[in-house]
Amino acid sequence: MRPYVITALRNPFLWLVPGVLVPVLVAIGALMFSRQNEVKATIWAQVPALIDTSIGGSSLKPPAEVEAQTFSERLTTESFRSSMITAAGLDERVEAGDWPGKSMTAALLSKLPLIGGSSGNDVEANRDSALAAVESSIRVEAQGNNLVHIIYTGGDAEAGVALVNAAIETFQKENVGQNSTQAQAVLDFYEKQVAERQEQLEEVDTNLRAFEAQYPVAMGASRPASEAQQLGQLQSTYNIRLSQYELALSRQSEAQVRAEASVTTMDNDFRVVDAPRLPSGPSLDIRRAAMLTFMGIVFGGGLAGLLIAVRTWTDNTVHKRDDVEKLLGMDVIASLPLLRKGGKK
């Protein structure tokens, strides 16, 4: 360790330049490139009472958490993000390569003669870049039981407003289609159940009528005990089948009402409380700036340590008596002090 300390003391620029200058430059760059626009919309979400929960059960999670999770899952699909880009009116800009734009590295590489312009008109690549930008710039957060925040973070504030509005519009359209499909599935379930109950009721009714026709009873006469018991069982079964049939009809009617109400209640279940607006100016992403600064400190310190180590390993300069004796294999009889200007040591 001592040789490295001596090298650092004798060559301060080895660690001052990378250890101090690099973190400072990175911190300045982090402050410059960590300023982004934030566009936010607030949504009110509540559990829709459209589908009979006796079939699929109900979730114990708050409505905001359920909607935020569903929204985030849809953002991971290309079809949803592609619909967002179309709804935001960004298709032409994406195809032309104007949105989301190139990163600084890509912009510099595009100016090189062998690289520049090679993929500027690649529509598929531009589309992939736009889809990735949507996924990375839009996030959904739940707050409390009923509030959902849809947040855009990026450099283009106007595109951010358009994307947030498009995200809400696309999500609502998919919800309407999904609710309609789910409501139709419930109606089909009850329709099948009613048909089954009706068939069972008709079967019992046929058996009951056949028994009465096979064992008629004269006016004022009584049935034998065995026949009366069998007839009672048939009538009991008929009453049970009748009640099951009427219950199935009742549930089918309720499901029909819920399905018809789904269109009119959708706006109340998921509605915009605060619409997205253009921000007054970009804000500093403190987390991003701190992370980049920390990386600059680590990189600068590592580079300083590496330079000191390399300098120490490659230094063949004689600094003391032991170095001479070790190099020549002979004892040093005397040494002359280093004289500076003015005759001082």
Image (cartoon, grey):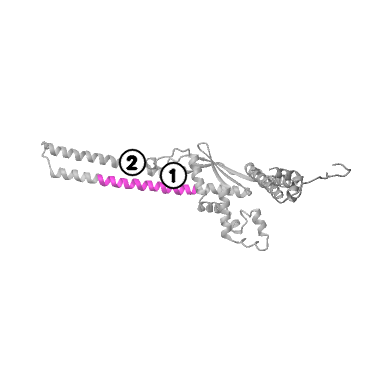
Magenta includes 182?
A: yes
Image point (62%, 62%), residue name:
118
Quadrant occupied by the C terminus:
top right
Is 67 positioned to the left or the right of 30 in the image?
A: left
Residue 262, label in figure: 1
Task: Using the rendered view, name the quadrant where residue 139 is placed.
Answer: top right
Residue type at mark 1 is Ser
Quadrant occupied by the N terminus:
top right
| Majority SS type along the magenta span | helix
189 vs 118, nearest the viewer = 118
- In the picture of the structure, the residue carrying the numbered disc 2 is 250
Image point (45%, 49%), residue name:
177
Q: Is residue 207 visible?
A: yes
Task: Using the rendered view, name the quadrant where residue 262 is placed.
Answer: top left
Is 245 positioned to the left or the right of 74 in the image?
A: left
Q: Position of residue 302 (x, y in %)?
A: 66, 46
Helix, strand or loop under label 1 = helix
Q: Do the numbered discs 2 and 1 sit on residues whose CB atoms are within 8 Å?
A: no
Image point (41%, 45%), residue name:
259
Q: Which residues are magenta?
A: 172-200
Mark 1: few/some/many CA within 10 Å (<14, 14-19, 20+):
some
Task: Using the rendered view, name the quadrant where residue 205 is placed.
Answer: top left
Image point (77%, 45%), residue name:
321
